[in-house]
Image: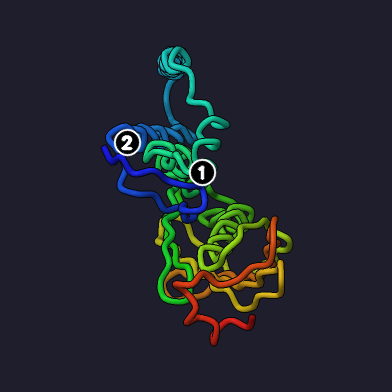
Amino acid sequence: MSDSRYHFRDIRVAETPEPGERAVLHRQLGRALAALNEQVLRLDASEESLRGYIEQVQSLSGALAEHGQRDYATTLRRLLDGEGSVDDVTDLVDFEILTGKASPISPPLELWLEEDRVRGKATFGPAFQGPPGRLHGGVIGLALDIVLAKTQDFVEQIGVTGTLKIRYLAGTPLGKPVEFEARPVRIEGRKLICEGSVWVDGQQTVAAEGIWISSRGDYRLKPEYADLEAAIRV
């Protein structure tokens, strides 16, 4: 287990340090539960079998409840004080909606920085269906909100979504790798303007534009990304 200490500002969206054993087990549990989410959809089982499964799930739920949960506010306080552990970082990131590797309601959506943009990928199953065989537009909107928010990893300060405009160009299929892309295009004081897109098999299915508002102070590029100034209107 690493003895490194982490500050909240060190955490990149949907990225964590090498996880400890506890986080690895949480991720395995999350994936197992996510598989149940898919299997229960229109489950073709007898009434007797369904009653049996309900009892098993209720028993598991009761067993899990006996352990309680780590206090989120305490974890966040340690990170804000620069005293967070690896487990604190994974507790904060691994249970995020859509991107959390330990979340049973996450595909998960993987995100990373590549040159001047954010890239991401995920494969969405039947639990995320909207039209038959297609990813729900609301899920796409949620994913884009997360992907575009990650453009803040290029800048100092952190903020919240101000505006998110989405244009659906084609249906986004289930069961296929979906690729996401976003990049910052302009900084205007406390505003970070960015754009994003969704792709499947080389075809763009969605386009997006967003404005993020800094919660404290103006946005500015981090020193390690100063070479992006020519590509981003500051």
Q: Compared with residue 193, is residue 53 higher up or lower down, i.e. above or below?
A: above
Image-quadrant location for residue 200: bottom left
At 66% across and 69% down in the image, what residue appears? 192
Which mark, by number, is residue 114?
Answer: none
Relative placement, left or right, of 74 versus 88 is right
Q: Regarding mark 1 in the picture, which secondary structure is present there?
A: loop
Q: Is residue 92 visible?
A: yes
Which amino acid does the dot numbered 1 rest on? Glu
Identity of the residue drawn at 57% across and 71% down: 196
Position of the N terminus by quadrant: top left
Q: Front-most of 35 and 27?
A: 27
Label annotation for residue 28: 2
Residue type at numbered disc 2: Gln
Q: Position of residue 181 (x, y in %)?
A: 50, 70
As drawn, 217 above or below 38: below
Tell me where residue 108 appears, x and y as whole percent: 43, 49
Most foreground residue, 57 or 48 = 57
Q: Which residue is mark 1?
A: 96
Q: How is the image coloured?
A: rainbow
How many residues crowd mark 2 within 10 Å: few (<14), some (14–19), many (20+)? some
User: Who comes first in sequence, dot 2 or dot 1?
Assistant: 2
Q: Is residue 193 left or right of residue 147?
A: right
Is residue 169 visible from the viewing direction of this image? no
